[in-house]
Image: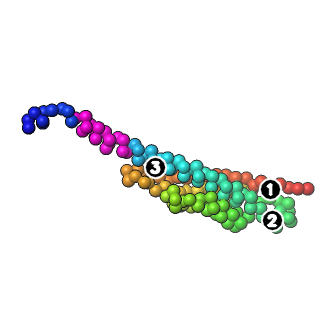
Amino acid sequence: MGQLLMSRRGDAYAWFATLLVFVFIPLSSLSIDVTRMMYVRGHLQTANDAACQSAADALDVPLFIQTNQKRIEPGLARRQAAREFSATLRDAGKIRYTIEGLAIDFPAPTFAHCIATVHVEHIIPLTPNMRVVIETTSEMRALTIR
């Protein structure tokens, strides 16, 4: 029994198990969740760009007909942006992220500024919570035909 306790043959397994628990498992969990977050970030950027351009293209038609002045109609812009945003992010349940919101403001008569926020659920319990925020500014593309 004493000879078995003094043997160093099993030390490699103990070191490997320690390395596995404290290094490899946390790194693999981080790589899985960070990859998902990067996917969600790209997808959110696309949705926010589409929603913001849709909001910027909401021309106030009665004003334009009367004065030939281009201006965004805020109510129409918000409705169009929300519709475009939700249509683009239909896979939220599959990818496991929660849409926190889409905020739209109008810094100028022909500009829309959009901020989209999502919360990405982590798969591995060791990974911290992740929140993605994307900002986009778009300008109206309406052309005046004479």
Label 2, on which residue? Answer: 61
Q: Amino acid at mark 1?
A: Ala
Q: Position of residue 60 (x, y in %)?
A: 78, 64
Question: In the rendered image, which quarter is residue 104 located in?
Answer: bottom right
Label 1, on which residue? Answer: 142
Identify the magenta region: 11-26
Q: Does 91 lie within the magenta span?
A: no
Label 3, on which residue? Answer: 33
Say whether residue 64 is left or right of residue 103: right
- The first of marks 2 and 3 along the sequence is 3
Q: Give the SS element for disc 2.
A: helix
Residue 108 visible: no
Q: Position of residue 5 (x, y in %)?
A: 12, 36
Decide: few, some or many residues near mark 1? Use Cα within 10 Å; few <14, some 14-19, many ≥20: few
In whole angstroms, how far apart are the C-alphas of marks 1 and 2?
A: 11 Å
Q: Amino acid at mark 3?
A: Asp
Q: Nearer the viewer, residue 86 or 24?
A: 24
